[in-house]
Amino acid sequence: MSKPLNVAMIGYGFMGRAHSNAYHKVNNFFELGHRPVLKVACGRNLDKTKAFAEQWGYESVESDWQKVLARKDVDLVDICTPNNTHAEIATAAAKAGKMILCEKPLAMNAEEGQRMVEAVEKAGVPNMVWYNYRRIPAVTLAKQLIDEGRLGKIFHYRAKFLQDWTISPELPQGGQGLWRLDVAAAGSGVTGDLLAHCIDTALWLNGDLATLTAMTETFIKERKHNLTGKVEKVGIDDAAIFMGRFRNGSLANFESTRYARGHKALYTFEINGEHASIFWDLHDLHRLQYFDHRDQGIVRGWRSVHVTDGDHPYMGHWWVPGLQIGYEHSFVHQVADFLEGVEKGKPAEPTFRDALRTQMVCDAILKSAQDGKWVKVAGA
Amino acid sequence: MSKPLNVAMIGYGFMGRAHSNAYHKVNNFFELGHRPVLKVACGRNLDKTKAFAEQWGYESVESDWQKVLARKDVDLVDICTPNNTHAEIATAAAKAGKMILCEKPLAMNAEEGQRMVEAVEKAGVPNMVWYNYRRIPAVTLAKQLIDEGRLGKIFHYRAKFLQDWTISPELPQGGQGLWRLDVAAAGSGVTGDLLAHCIDTALWLNGDLATLTAMTETFIKERKHNLTGKVEKVGIDDAAIFMGRFRNGSLANFESTRYARGHKALYTFEINGEHASIFWDLHDLHRLQYFDHRDQGIVRGWRSVHVTDGDHPYMGHWWVPGLQIGYEHSFVHQVADFLEGVEKGKPAEPTFRDALRTQMVCDAILKSAQDGKWVKVAGA
Amino acid sequence: MSKPLNVAMIGYGFMGRAHSNAYHKVNNFFELGHRPVLKVACGRNLDKTKAFAEQWGYESVESDWQKVLARKDVDLVDICTPNNTHAEIATAAAKAGKMILCEKPLAMNAEEGQRMVEAVEKAGVPNMVWYNYRRIPAVTLAKQLIDEGRLGKIFHYRAKFLQDWTISPELPQGGQGLWRLDVAAAGSGVTGDLLAHCIDTALWLNGDLATLTAMTETFIKERKHNLTGKVEKVGIDDAAIFMGRFRNGSLANFESTRYARGHKALYTFEINGEHASIFWDLHDLHRLQYFDHRDQGIVRGWRSVHVTDGDHPYMGHWWVPGLQIGYEHSFVHQVADFLEGVEKGKPAEPTFRDALRTQMVCDAILKSAQDGKWVKVAGA
Amino acid sequence: MSKPLNVAMIGYGFMGRAHSNAYHKVNNFFELGHRPVLKVACGRNLDKTKAFAEQWGYESVESDWQKVLARKDVDLVDICTPNNTHAEIATAAAKAGKMILCEKPLAMNAEEGQRMVEAVEKAGVPNMVWYNYRRIPAVTLAKQLIDEGRLGKIFHYRAKFLQDWTISPELPQGGQGLWRLDVAAAGSGVTGDLLAHCIDTALWLNGDLATLTAMTETFIKERKHNLTGKVEKVGIDDAAIFMGRFRNGSLANFESTRYARGHKALYTFEINGEHASIFWDLHDLHRLQYFDHRDQGIVRGWRSVHVTDGDHPYMGHWWVPGLQIGYEHSFVHQVADFLEGVEKGKPAEPTFRDALRTQMVCDAILKSAQDGKWVKVAGA
């Protein structure tokens, strides 16, 4: 019989829903020592928080996250609030001795992230950042293939995260559901929101980035702010491109934008190795494209692997071969791995420390874009 | 606040899991008047039933389905047992005044199905058959496009359901998890298991089939029976093909097999109309291919519609554009529609009566394959 | 130095162009003992024939094919006229001792085809029918893979040839460029025009068809005749479907139509074997999809083979890997193989006798569609 | 009746074949005032030149290109020799008053290119550079769609040219067929060979590049030289990436490599505009992917346009809808356009002057990669 693990959810937006769903489902599909219990939901707007709590079955609500941290019946704090609040909540939660799951990006910048890492490590609390794409089975399979050495020496790593939802100049910035366009709340635009995902995956699959040079662009210079009603300068980056070198000698080419008409959430990566290559695409997340040069020449080609078999990562827990899972399942896998890590005393990745490396790359991107120069990535 | 609706699950196999998951999730994502409560799980093997009940949170277990029907605290009976038990359980459940959700195919044959229809209609109980693929958003979108008249006159309807999991002669027939290969339990092979799905969708999208001619094949003639240990004649059809005419004058070409190497669950359909065509594929269930001849010639082409936007069927309940849902969500949608139907007193399709039409086509297929002649589909 | 081989072209339509181009190019890309010389073009309309001859460099023109056959300076007669003229011209050409290349289908029916076979075999003249798709490199590669035994026992062969150019009821039948819609000139509709291609490939790749049952449809019942100006009954089949059994026990599912909106010339085939499967599509003719179950499970998937390498069939004669050839090259390959066959005294396939087998299947289709019964394919 | 235009071919390698084929075919498919006559082939190795001349029907051979220029019966000189010889031959040919078609890249660098431009403009001779990809119908269609304003304001232009043929360290550099790996003959590696194609297309479709920053890599540092037999430092760039800004404000992301396992000649570009986006891929050169946001939302998706219809650029000259042409046809189109330009006195693009702009971008890339700084593109 699994032990209860009491969860406090801070925030009730898109990620609040995605994580709550994961807590709900995880024990139906995974054999685990612990069972998340939705103890308390916390949000500044109490009516909305109550509605959220009822929808998802949270036992209670709070409007002040500090009260949540003070509760004895809370084991784990899940931070789903805008980026500019992560550091304060996380460091306080660490002091309160809570386990912490924090939405990505970890922090507004590496300096802030560094303090968060120190806080959780000093407190010795289990901690993890929600870079959920690592746990899409096709991506996890990519990791497995690389770790088995199938690709050989890596020459190229290419990643893109393309969207098109901010092309209209009428779209406001800031306010409910739009804080990602407000630099004060988000810290950056596509760099922290989208490229951060690409970077997390890349560091995991291909190791540290050593140096890079970047450019950013803000196509729409002014937008009305949703809350103030004023037309204000847009502070975020609408698009960011960087190229660089990984420590293993491979070349990086990364790009993200919210101005790529026709793409809703097209996160893709491709890795070219001496012997084999891999390509993945979030729009068909259940497939992995794999090319192996060691295949016989006349029948050599990119293989479209439908990652739905029982021996594919995580898939034995779901349905039968051929039947897809979706986006939300990556969160279920992450909770499952976290709980297994708690059980075994072995932290699930990415920890705050892992996520700090991604933050350092983000800082390097923004710095290079500002200065127009190559930069060395801190800590690399 | 939603009202509880007490569910009894008969069977704990693959579909028992799929349905239980749907009952669990539906109220997190849909605003509904009722809330399924997992009251009792029933199975002949009590240990396995208990394990299943614990995994999914059923409040109690039974080993005798007749006891389940006798319980006052059961509102709805969900029949997930092998095909040869559907009729007996369903007719008894109807007499007991329970709502009934029955796995597909409805029955072993149309005669049996006819009795089931009569039983539920006489009892006046809400009833539905789990032809879940209607509620994959891309398929529901296809229905919407057809109903809007976008395709014009229909010329062709083509469907296939291809698998490859029974190619090995070493695979036994019958017994735990393999009753689909045992003609006594399943009634037929791919006809009732796979083609039935294709037919249900086709009748929904394109109306009744009028006439057809069919062929079937059993490639492996003898297999060891898993329970008896004896090598016995294989009674099911491994493959079935039929061609025919719909009442609207369009031509049908349907095929199903478990001997199509490389395909796990490749259910595809294509509809060719005067003005537009539609193609769908279960292996990429989140996409709909759409061709519209009225597009300007030089930029005319098949459109790959990523069916993940808020204005696509059901998708407003899930995540954001670009993020896929999977196979299991079709069951959630079906529960949501059923509960809404209960609320509004308007039955959700396919009812037993709808499913009987599919059963009549299956009977016609098997009859034609045996006689080598064209047959008229009963009731069409 | 290659020897001249004098070609007489009968007809100057679409195929006249395709073949002339092949004669022109073949010696630039293939080392051959013979060199086609465009000696004479023949057509009933002398002005058009002259224009054609000038465009393609034919040395002379004739309006009477019998005069062509009487010419001493003609070695080879290429028959590109409507189907209802093949038999008369070919049997006369055989008597005149000419090599004969005849457009497909061989004849109006098998009886006519039988006489043509007898004529060429009695005369002992090299003969071939222009089923050009065998020589698309990806198709030839499929043949190679099958002959190497990679697929193992074959279970299924599926082929389709879908077009959409006759959907408009305003399209006339008959006359210049439209004789394919006139049953008197064409013999049949899609059966002889499109299915014949699918059948030729199938017999080559998978052996004889033993039995089949077919249906045809004429969606537009009356059309204006282009020459007479009268609205007349349409005699051709707009669509044809058949299913059957090959002699090797595999199941056949074939379909062709000119009413599949969105498809210009979508000839596809798929072969499912015990170990491996193959799929090909004329709309991407330079690719072969290959699935091999013997690949390791976690990286097993359909391989998209870009058939452009030097070790792929015919491709060493063209460009470099990655660079496509197109439709017209299949004719060049066929001429190259024919000329090599002449050199070596070993006839290139398909000969008239090979093409007669396809004709027998076409006859069986039309017969079965008329009678609504299964038929045994003659000669199989 | 078309007038003869006498062609002298300098070089007999891969491009010598591709161009000769184009001269051969052009009048069969296009109505033109001129007809190329293959007058003389010129190469240093006379035996090989003779073999080439015989294969392609050149009337005579020369081993000294200066003799060719002196011939009165030569109207047009086609330069297919290694890059380091272009300038000398072209400037001499200009002085001799010949029309000049020069292989790409125009020159070893912009300074050399500038002199070539001056020479041809001073001489007033028709001139063109063989950036053939502009004339692949799908690419020409892209140009047409952009010129019609369908994309609106452009935000992003992304291009890649990926190959994998130099991954083996055993591959020698220099010598017959391998001069592209020898910096002395080629001037650069992928920058001049592959990126130059991407740049030519980009400048044509999207206007001038203003600024950029680049990086290059040479993965294999030393290779045996094929002619000298000595192991020598590799001077070329194996991979090059650059990002930058076009004058119209859109962002550039370009990459080329010969170390991308799985890609033979994967030239792709994608353009994201305010209203619509375009994607093209050389590996499926007959298709254009087009997304138009103005399509109705529920059926909006990327359209796969099979660019084979009579109203698509150039396609009316070839076969019928659905039937592909290939790589070689781009050269035929270029000759056709050149001859039409000669006829009309309106030069076909890209002229030497157009190609010089591409050369300036290449110079900027190599300069930036060396210095690690952003550079302004000369002339932009």
Image: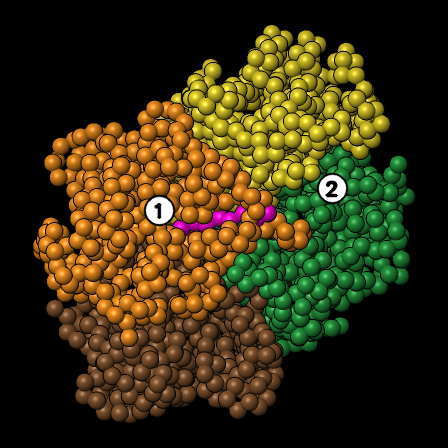
Chain colours: A brown, B orange, C yellow, D green
Residue appearing at x 54%, y 58% in the figure: D299
Q: Is residue C45 magenta?
A: no
**Near-viewer residue (A269 or C372):** C372
- Amino acid type, callout 1: Asp
Numbered circle sitting on residue C252: none
**Near-viewer residue (B309 or B352):** B352
Residue appearing at x 23%, y 62% in the figure: A29
Residue C18 seen in this snapshot? yes
Q: Which SS class for mark 1?
A: helix
Mark nearer the viewer, 2 or 1: 1
**Near-viewer residue (C270 or C97):** C270
- The answer to whether marks 2 and 1 sit on the same chain is no
Callout count: 2
Residue appearing at x 47%, y 26% in the figure: C214
Residue C286 seen in this snapshot? no
Mark 2: few, some, or many residues within 10 Å (few <14, many ≥20)?
few
Image: magenta residue range: B275-284
Residue appearing at x 40%, y 56% in the figure: B136
Q: Which residue is mark 1?
A: B354
Image quadrant holding the C terminus of chain C, namely: top left
**Near-viewer residue (C2 or A242):** A242
- Amino acid type, callout 2: His
Image quadrant holding the N terminus of chain C, namely: top right
Across and down, in percent, residue C221 comes to 61, 31
Q: Which residue is mark 2?
A: D317
